[in-house]
Image (tube, rainbow, N blue to C red):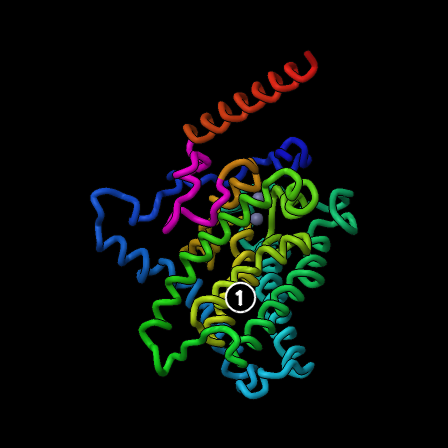
Amino acid sequence: MNAAELGPSARYAGYRPEQPIPLGPLHKRPLQLGKVAKSLFGFPGIFLPWNAFFFGLAFIEWHYFLPDESRLKIFSADWIVTLALCNLVTLVTFATAQHVWLYGRKSQGTEYKYNSAWLATGNSTFMFGSQLWDNVFWNICSAVPFWTAYEVLTLWLQANGYVPTASWQEHPIYCTSLILVISVWIDLHFYLTHRLLHWQPLYKTVHYLHHKNANFGPWSGVAMHPVEHLIFFSSILLFWVLPANTLLTLYMLQIFGIAPSLAHVGFERLMFGKERSLSVDNYMHYLHHKHVNVNFGNSVEFLPFDKWMGTFHDGSDQAAEALKNRMLARAARKRASRARKSA
Ligand SMILES: [Zn+2]
Ligand SMILES: [Zn+2]
């Protein structure tokens, strides 16, 4: 599916960053350790501000709403419903805040907006004829249940000692380093599963649903087919093998549950007044939704798979030209194959 097939809104030009998307400093030579450290611990960096915010949310949930381990050993409606409500409220609040501010009140107009069109209405591509309500439906009716199910199962396995665990008190350095491991793992898991979802049988039956949002908004993040949710939230299976704990479990799933909302906000920067703004930096994934056959990865910070596999679109004219040539070559191969079959 390309922009032309997705209706006029997908083709509207909007903000385009002046600089191509840079590779992370780990992949620049000579290696500059200062820049690597800044990308990890600086502001903005891997952890600040967004992952710190997600960790804070996970901590609040862990501290105030998660029962002690003895209760987690037994499946029980009270704590399962509590966790489901936590996930629901967090996602609804986070996505609604962005939507109301940027798409409802249009507080910064189309400034820094990648696609100058707004979300589709009166469009039969989407359920209820509305991109927003279609997206909300998949978030609430599929994403939250899958997110909660993986969470409940993992916490139960950890509480019963059926999977390895490591506590902050006994292994503070190991547990802290897992925060970084999670960031690398997310890049790896997202890339591999996303490539799988672009395998044509899965794309046509499952992943197409997410790609209906060529021009996306905050509710598009986890607007996915249930099979995609099953694959997407399976990232937590890492903690079925690697020793972790309840807080890290909530944290990783928090990232998968609500970070996509921010990654699909559709703006390069969020403005606070005329002077101050905060980078969201989701152009790489915007280009994936726009062109479909590029940027399968989450970022080019730790594991720049797209760069390695020749599918990286950094937003430059050269990358656009390379993509055009790849598409022409692919179309020529398909024509030749069809001609061979009919001969
Ligand atoms: Zn995709
Ligand atoms: Zn997406």
- Pointer 1: residues within 10 angstroms few (<14), some, or many (20+)? many
Question: Predominant secondary structure in magenta?
Answer: loop
Residue shown at 64% from the left, 48% from the top: 210
Check disc 1 and give the amino acid type.
Answer: Leu
Question: Could you tell me how many numbered marks the image carries?
Answer: 1
- Asked where in the image residue 205 lies, by quadrant, the reply is top right
> Can you name the residue that lies furthest to the front here?
162
Query: Looking at the picture, how far across and down is residue 80, in whole percent?
Result: 65, 78
Query: Looking at the picture, how far across and down is residue 267, in whole percent?
Result: 51, 49
Residue shown at 39% from the left, 42% from the top: 21
Residue 341 vs residue 318, the one in the foreground: 341
Q: Which residue is mark 1?
A: 253
> Can you name the residue that lies furthest to the top here?
343
Residue shown at 60% from the left, 72% from the top: 153
Residue shown at 68% from the left, 35% from the top: 7
Magenta segment, which residues? 295-316
Q: Is residue 332 above or below residue 54?
A: above
- Asked where in the image residue 139 lies, by quadrant, the reply is bottom right
Q: Is residue 41 above or below residue 15?
A: below
Q: Is residue 148 left or right of residue 243?
A: right
